[in-house]
């Protein structure tokens, strides 16, 4: 993959149907780790999707493409806060382990310099490896990790949160 093949850009309302389809894939994958089932209409919870496209200055949705193909998305929240949050991040399996995910995170983080945090689940081994690698690549030896209870879900294991500072800040 060359960097010219990868595009990370703000998602517009015209991109919403594409991101909604990717959202279904994302939530389906996550259902393995939290036991969430689809709604009666076959969709999954979409509060974060709605928030990302709400027009709030505190949220930014991004569409990740390789060439003409959409391959993922990133939702960033807390843009007006001292610490930004990668709220949702997804890359389709067909491009995983090719550098697309790391390159996309680098691009998103570079657009919003400062402190960052992202959560993942301990029982999701792909996410564990990926987010620790991202933190080490972006802030070598200068990132931290902690576990926090999932709000309103005492039945779930705590989320793992990594914290780092963007390299351009």
Image: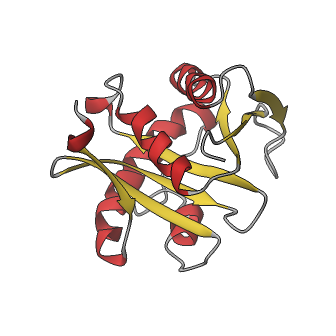
> Which corner quadrant of the image does residue 81 belong to?
bottom right
x, y percent for residue 142: 75, 26
Visible residue check, residue 67: yes
Which residue is painted at 56% across and 19% down in the image? 129
Visible residue check, residue 42: no
Q: Nearer the viewer, residue 82 or 21?
A: 82
Q: Nearer the viewer, residue 68 or 27?
A: 68
- In the picture provided, is 42 more to the left or to the right than 142? left
x, y percent for residue 109: 55, 48
In the displayed structure, 169 sits above or below 41; it is: above
- In the picture provided, is 104 more to the left or to the right than 144? left
Look at the image and name its color scheme: secondary structure
> Which corner quadrant of the image does residue 123 belong to?
top right
Q: Nearer the viewer, residue 38 or 53?
A: 53
Which quadrant of the figure contains the N terminus?
A: top left
> Which corner quadrant of the image does residue 17 belong to?
bottom left
The residue sitting at the front extreme is 168
The residue sitting at the bottom extreme is 55
Which residue is painted at 59% across and 29% down in the image? 131
In the displayed structure, 110 sits above or below 62; it is: above
x, y percent for residue 150: 79, 44
């Amino acid at each position: 993959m060359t960097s010219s093949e990868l595009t990370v850009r703000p998602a517009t309302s015209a991109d919403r149907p594409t991101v909604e389809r990717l959202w279904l894939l994302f939530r389906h994958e996550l259902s393995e780790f939290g036991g969430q089932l689809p709604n009666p209409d076959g969709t999954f919870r979409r509060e974060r999707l709605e928030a990302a496209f709400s027009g709030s200055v505190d949220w930014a949705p991004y569409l990740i493409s390789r060439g003409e193909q959409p391959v993922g998305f990133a939702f960033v929240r807390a843009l007006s806060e001292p610490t930004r949050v990668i709220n949702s991040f997804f890359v389709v399996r067909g491009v995983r382990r090719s550098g697309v995910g790391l390159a996309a995170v680098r691009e998103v983080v570079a657009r919003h310099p400062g402190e960052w945090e992202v959560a993942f689940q301990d029982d999701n081994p792909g996410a564990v490896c990926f987010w620790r690698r991202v933190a080490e690549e972006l802030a070598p030896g200068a990132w931290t990790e902690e576990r926090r209870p999932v709000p309103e879900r005492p039945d779930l294991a705590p989320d793992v949160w990594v914290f780092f500072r963007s390299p351009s800040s």
